[in-house]
Image: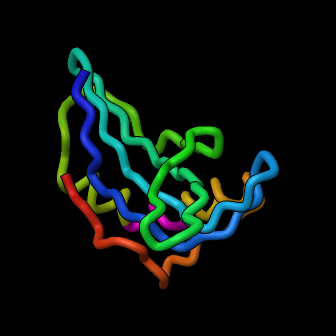
Amino acid sequence: MVSVNVYERYYRAECLYNGIMRHGAKAVLLYESEEGSYSYTAQLIFFPHNDPEDYGVTYDAFFTETLLEGKGRRSKKKEAELLEHLQECCDRLAAQAGGTVFWEEPLTPERRG
């Protein structure tokens, strides 16, 4: 299986989950491929971020939504379209968790793969 983080960035966020206040979120657009089939998945992970150096991601506040599945290979055009809607999708995931992502307050530069 091939997995590629098409997009990854950390943002300031607020979410109380499992009794722990989280002040950061990691937003990811993930591409996975195996035996001619692919999927694109949005991932949102809330983490404590109690100080500027704290990027220890916990995996209990991990939310996903499959955006696209099919046969074929990776497409930059599809990725561009999916990236346009990533924030909207992550906002839905955040709402399910009772949290908020502050998109105008990134904690790191974006990474693309």
Residue 46 placement, left or right of 105:
right
| Quadrant in the picture for residue 112 | bottom left
At x 42%, y 74%, the residue is 107
At x 60%, y 70%, the residue is 13
Residues in magenta?
Answer: 84-88
Q: Position of residue 20 (x, y in %)?
A: 74, 54
Q: Position of residue 30 (x, y in %)?
A: 35, 43
Q: Is residue 54 above or below residue 56?
A: below
Q: Where is residue 73 in the image (x, y as percent from the top left)?
A: 18, 34
Would you say the magenta stretch is mainly helix, strand or loop?
A: helix
**Image quadrant containing the N terminus:** top left
At x 19%, y 40%, the residue is 74
| Quadrant in the picture for residue 50 | bottom right
Residue 60 placement, left or right of 57:
right
Q: In this view, does 11 lie above or below 93?
A: below
Q: Does the magenta stretch include residue 111?
A: no
